[in-house]
Image (cartoon, rainbow, N blue to C red):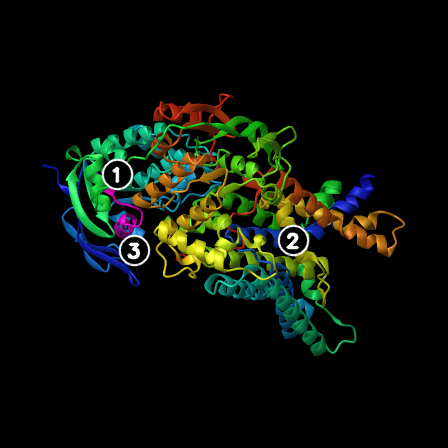
Amino acid sequence: MSKPLALELKGISKTFGSIVANKDVDLEVRRGEILAILGENGSGKTTLMNMVSGIYFPDEGQIFVDGKEVVIRSPKDAFDYKIGMIHQHFKLVDVFTATENIVLGINDGKKFNIKEAQARVKEITDRYGFQIDLDKKIYEMSVSEKQTVEIIKVLYRGADILILDEPTAVLTPQETQKLFVVLRNMRADNKTVIIITHKLHEVLAISDRVTILRKGEFIETVQTSEATEQSLTEGMVGQKVSLDIERKDPENLQERLIIKDLNVTDFEGKALLKDVNFTAYGGEILGIAGISGSGQKELLESVAGLQKADKGSSIIYFDPEGNEVQLVGKTPKAIRNLGIALSFVPEDRLGMGLVGNMDIIDNMMLRSYKKGKTEFLDRKQPRELAEEIIDSLEVVTPSATTPVRRLSGGNVQKVLVGREISLNPRVLMVAYPVRGLDINSSYMIYNLISKQKEQGVAVIFVGEDLDVLIELCDRIMVINSGEITGIVEGKKAQKEELGILMTKSTHGEEAVDDE
Amino acid sequence: MFATLLSFFPRAVVQGIPLLYGSAGEILTEKSGNLNLGIPGIMYMGGIGGVIGAFLYENSVPATENLNPFLAVFIPLMSCLLVSLLGGLIYCFLTVTLRANQNVTGLALTTFGVGFGNFFGASLVKLTGSDIPSIALTRTSAFFTKKLPFAESLGWFGKLFCSYSFLAYFAIIVAIVMAIFLKRTRGGLHLRAVGENPATADAAGINVNRSKYLATCIGSMIAGLGGIYYVMDYANGVWSNEGFGDRGWLAIALVIFAVWRPNLSIFGSIVFGGLYIVYIFIPGMSMRSQELFKMLPYVVTIIVLIMVSIRKKKENLPPASLGLSYFREDR
């Protein structure tokens, strides 16, 4: 390695109150190199990089840029050292065009001329191979286009060291490939790229070296060429982890839900779901893949009775005796009173699934309070259930009476999934159940879901990680702009194929994501 | 028919000018994300501010021929701007620095402004020792109502377009300049970014609080000019308490009617002014139906509001962070 060091961190520590976010972290990255920072959620990757980009200030340690020690107190300082960070949540003005967003806040002392600025932006896009319409408004853009604008914005400000925080979390496989092409072009242009991620195969695909963090501490830096998925995972988790999901072949499939011509239109007349047809079987996991906001939520909510379906839609449910029950037009309560067990983990787990200010026991009671015979609440059974969930799912909480809002995201998720499964559902619908969870908890939940399937439950699983969908699901249905674009066998599915289906449109127009 | 139009249009314009000032000021303010519902109060304060200035100057120069035309205009204008600036500063200090709720602050400021105006109005009336509860500053007003010299000689054209005072033309210039500023300049781009997404503007190195203060205070001063125009030109220098009526609220309605575009509010102000006085031109109106007709501008605003929200075109919607206070460390 003859290339000079671009950025070097020595002994960086940062605490927030009593929580240690980073402890004595060392890191170095060279010019013309792509470094991956790998770690689980909550391992302090983003905090570390926020200290480099001027959002936080380190408690201890030194930062060197090009071998000289620097002090970075604000994002502006970071820009002066040519460091730019692309955050997970984009900072863009919706009603502005791409160019307007890119030049925002720059006062070069020259006369304001958006056309000239656009020409300069164009130079950058041509140089690195970005594909973007600079006159397009942000609100008309897909997530990947918005990300492109963010990257160009940082480059336009002259950054030589780019930090990308989980850049592929919201991209399709094709978009990810495009991004990687651009990143490689930047490397060839002698820029330094730091990419924060927890996806192993991306680390292997794009980076030159990997720095692994665990619980805020620096573990090691390895050459990517010498690493494997297994070795990286062990570094991240600190113990051997089995990365296999036990998928038994589905047995004695029974039709459980038949959805026919399901249409949902919002009050402005925009179609949210268009002619959705599919069958969900008991004893099978049906995966749903798609760019977020493509109608997954509406689909699940229609089945749960939370979303009004258009005339002519039909959702047939088969009860244990084999009778057909029409779910369209029933209220969520009526659906439950009929003895139809739908368990629903909403996308926004705290918003709809749990009440943040109530403790775990009370949240259990949200599902059972109607069972009591008297006006007084029975807290005994919910308490037992809460304790059982805390034990079996290893929920980290001071006690069962701690408000749910105080738990970390992963633990909240476990409480919610645990409660829904405890109802012994016949149809289990889950959306993004592992969002924000560490690897061990994720696999625990995957295996819980698999067990439900073995017990004959019809599972509908909305996920975002295609690798997991392919490993876990028996069939994968792809949804795009409210339309089903294909159903693929889980065992035979290819990521690229799913990616194409995710952006394919039956009308030949570009898919628009409005997240 | 043409004769009716000839007398109707200028009156509609004269009615509309205070609304144009008010709405232009409020548009600038709202583009920074501040929903200043104190505009009616600030316009009222601007009016009384002008009256105080004119009163002091008139009293210091007893003879009409000794009045300096420049000072007779300049002093009331400055006192008007100063008092409206005070209103804007109060609003900014409470909502931007102390991050108080914008709606409550605005409504309180309107109540305060009306009280402020009424207090000084009544005090001045007492100083003059007059029997009627109003002050007539006709000598100052004569300078404010000066029309373009060639208006008379141009026939109907002169009557329609040249028969107004300098403050009326200034209002239109302000609106046009503001439209260009918002659309075509770096400052305008930055200001709009603050109103749309202050966190983004902040990250881009724009001083959010400074932009909000500047836009709101300048907006308040512009709105205050609507107050002085009303007293000195429309009312011929006669101030009476509560005489300003609901014009301040109409100005805020006009902001919505013009979908946050100052150039559209020029047209809108004339429409509103016309609707406000159209009852005079309909013969045989009873007092009751007159009041119904005065509702028309609000009805039109509601219709525009419904149309805009149905079409939901992002460019026609209010600035995205309108009414929200910004604090960098809120996450």
Q: Chain of mark 1?
A: A
**Same chain letter for marks 2 and 3:** no
Q: Amino acid at mark 3?
A: Tyr
CB within 8 Å, label 3 to label 1: no
User: How far from the left and from the top, in percent, is residue B166?
Assistant: 63, 53
- State the residue position of label 1: A242
Q: Is residue A59 above or below residue A41?
A: below
Residue nearest the viewer, comparing A427 with A432: A427
**Within the magenta stretch, is there residue A369?**
no
Residue pushed farthest right? B284
Q: Which contiguous range is marked in magenta?
A: A35-53
Q: Chain of mark 3?
A: A
Q: Chain of mark 2?
A: B
- State the residue position of label 2: B251
- State the residue position of label 3: A56
Query: Which residue occupies 62% across, 47% down?
Result: B256
Q: Local crowd at mark 2 within 10 Å, few (<14), some, or many (≥20)?
A: many
Q: Is residue B32 above or below residue B239?
A: above
Query: Which residue occupies 64% across, 57% down?
Result: B226
Separation of residues labelled 2 and 3 (CA atoms): 44 Å
User: How far from the left and from the top, in percent, is residue B265?
Assistant: 63, 46
Separation of residues labelled 3 and 1 (CA atoms): 36 Å
Mark closer to the observer (2, 1): 1
Q: Local crowd at mark 1 within 10 Å, few (<14), some, or many (≥20)?
A: few
Mark nearer the N terminus (3 vs 1): 3
Query: Which residue occupies 26% across, 36% down?
Result: A200
Q: Secondary structure at mark 1?
A: loop
Q: Secondary structure at mark 3?
A: loop
